[in-house]
């Protein structure tokens, strides 16, 4: 059913009376004024999902980048949107669906004059699922889902007002806890791009202050930079689990660099160090290394005193090791990967396989560089305790499997390292004599 037909049928129900005359109904702030709207029972077949729903923005944008635009008026696309809505929080949705089946719709939604759901997409999708499932739901349970209780916005509700309402009645309420981490960053950026002021974003998203708004926009920029770096532009589903905390730490470290608070970095190297830090952090985020492997992300991107950035020599050697580990890595282009995809699920598998191939090539070298830098930092803490450091060095040397030296393809480098150990030992001996 097209928009004009839906609009006409909804008009036949409301007769154009959207505002209450007896103060009974749902109170909304609309166009700067608090007004009471009439609540109507709208046949659920007259509704369509809001494809720009902030709850599933990352999934929609990623799908459209990988495949094609979603049209909620098309049955196939509507089903895909419903899957996104359910998968966005499947545990909570199971409980909500059971509650709706038993009690019907308890919260009033908001729709446009032509049936686009502004607030209530998730609930409507669960109601549609119940209505169409004769096997698992009784006639009474399905009957409770035939109509969607909602207020209807006037015809003059524009895109900006609709986005404000969606934000206020979803992200600006307790329901925002059900959103994935990426959604709030995307939503803040979308609002900013549509002309909302920083103060508006703060108010409508229920944020504490303008600093939170700035942080959302800054981190969103880093997220896009991360995806661009690996040719995943616009594919937000490629963000690994736990990315948010890593990006927040990186953002703080970048601010510290730009402010000049890292004393060893000269002005003409600020941009270079910032770029190296971003690229290195991106690689370790993508590597998805775990603490069980001895990896601590905050050692790279942190404002603490014991991170790599606070020591020029450690940082320079760490950057050099990262460059060596990644300089010759070649990957299949995203276009080539997507060209072989047979569908949404297949695309996820192919892109994950692309990431895993990259991880397999660089993991060992990246972790070696990280461990060397981390050990150097830890050893510097013990510089006034030479016996402790010597025991560490002796234990490390004893662990070398001598049988592998003869078969090594790096004998020249090994020889140089052994000579360096001898030189250092000679200097140490001279120091105690």
Image (tube, grey):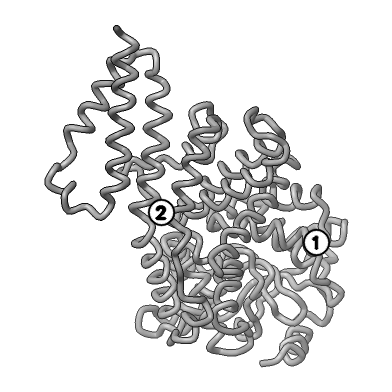
Circle 1: is it few (<14), some (14-19), or many (20+) Cα within 10 Å? many
Quadrant of the frame with the C terminus: top left
Mark number for residue 374? Answer: none
Mark number for residue 288? Answer: 2
Farthest-out residue, top: 433
Q: Which residue is drawn at 24% across and 22% down?
A: 391
Q: Which residue is drawn at 82% across and 82% down?
A: 15
Frontmost residue, 304 versus 362: 362
Frontmost residue, 141 versus 370: 370
Eyeballing the image, is 121 above or below 193?
Answer: below
Q: Earlier in the sequence, mark 1 or mark 2?
A: 1
Mark number for residue 36? Answer: 1
Circle 2: is it few (<14), some (14-19), or many (20+) Cα within 10 Å? some
Helix, strand or loop status at disc 1:
strand
Eyeballing the image, is 88 above or below 414?
Answer: below
Q: In which quarter of the image is residue 417?
A: top left
x and y, in percent, of residue 419 in the image: 30, 34
x and y, in percent, of residue 182 in the image: 57, 58
Farthest-out residue, left: 403
Note whether residue 306 is visible.
yes
Quadrant of the frame with the N terminus: bottom right
In front: label 1 or label 2: 2
Eyeballing the image, is 351 above or below 192?
Answer: below
Q: How far apart are marks 1 and 2 (CA)?
A: 50 Å
Q: Quadrant of residue 133?
A: bottom left
Helix, strand or loop status at disc 2:
loop
């Amino acid at each position: 059913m097209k928009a004009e037909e839906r609009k006409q049928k909804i008009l036949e129900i409301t007769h154009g009376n959207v505002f209450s005359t007896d103060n009974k109904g749902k109170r909304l702030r609309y166009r700067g004024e608090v007004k009471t709207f009439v609540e109507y029972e709208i046949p659920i077949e007259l509704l369509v999902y809001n494809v720009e729903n902030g709850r599933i923005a990352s999934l929609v944008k990623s799908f459209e980048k990988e495949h094609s635009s979603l049209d909620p008026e098309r049955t196939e696309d509507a089903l895909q949107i419903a899957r996104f809505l359910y998968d966005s929080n499947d545990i909570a949705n199971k409980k909500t669906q059971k509650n709706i089946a038993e009690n019907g719709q308890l919260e009033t939604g908001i729709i446009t004059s032509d049936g686009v759901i502004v607030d209530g997409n998730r609930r409507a999708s669960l109601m549609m699922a119940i209505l169409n499932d004769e096997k698992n739901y009784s006639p009474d349970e399905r009957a409770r889902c035939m109509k969607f209780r909602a207020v209807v916005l006037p015809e003059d509700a524009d895109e900006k007002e609709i986005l404000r309402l969606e934000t206020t009645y979803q992200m600006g309420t307790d329901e925002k806890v059900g959103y994935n981490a990426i959604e709030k960053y995307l939503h803040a950026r979308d609002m900013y791009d549509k002309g909302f002021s920083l103060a508006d974003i703060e108010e409508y998203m229920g944020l504490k202050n303008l600093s939170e708004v700035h942080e959302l926009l800054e981190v969103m920029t880093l997220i896009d930079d991360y995806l661009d770096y690996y040719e995943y532009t616009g594919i937000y589903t490629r963000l690994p689990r736990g990315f948010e905390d890593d990006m927040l730490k990186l953002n703080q470290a970048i601010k510290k660099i730009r402010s000049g608070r890292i004393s060893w970095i000269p002005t003409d190297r600020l941009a270079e160090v910032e770029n190296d830090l971003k690229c290195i952090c991106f690689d370790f985020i993508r590597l998805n290394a775990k603490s069980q492997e001895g990896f601590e992300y905050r050692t790279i991107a942190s404002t603490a005193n014991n991170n790599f950035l606070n020591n020029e020599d450690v940082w320079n050697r760490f950057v050099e090791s990262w460059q060596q580990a990644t300089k010759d890595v070649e990957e299949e282009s995203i276009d080539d990967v997507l060209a072989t995809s047979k569908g949404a699920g297949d695309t996820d598998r192919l892109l994950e396989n692309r990431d895993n191939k990259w991880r397999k090539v660089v993991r060992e070298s990246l972790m070696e560089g990280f461990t060397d830098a981390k050990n150097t930092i830890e050893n510097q803490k013990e510089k006034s305790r030479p016996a402790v450091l010597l025991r560490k060095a002796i234990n490390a040397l004893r662990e070398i499997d001598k049988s592998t030296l003869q078969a090594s393809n790096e004998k020249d480098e090994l020889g140089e390292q052994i000579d360096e150990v001898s030189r250092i030992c000679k200097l140490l001996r001279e120091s105690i004599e």
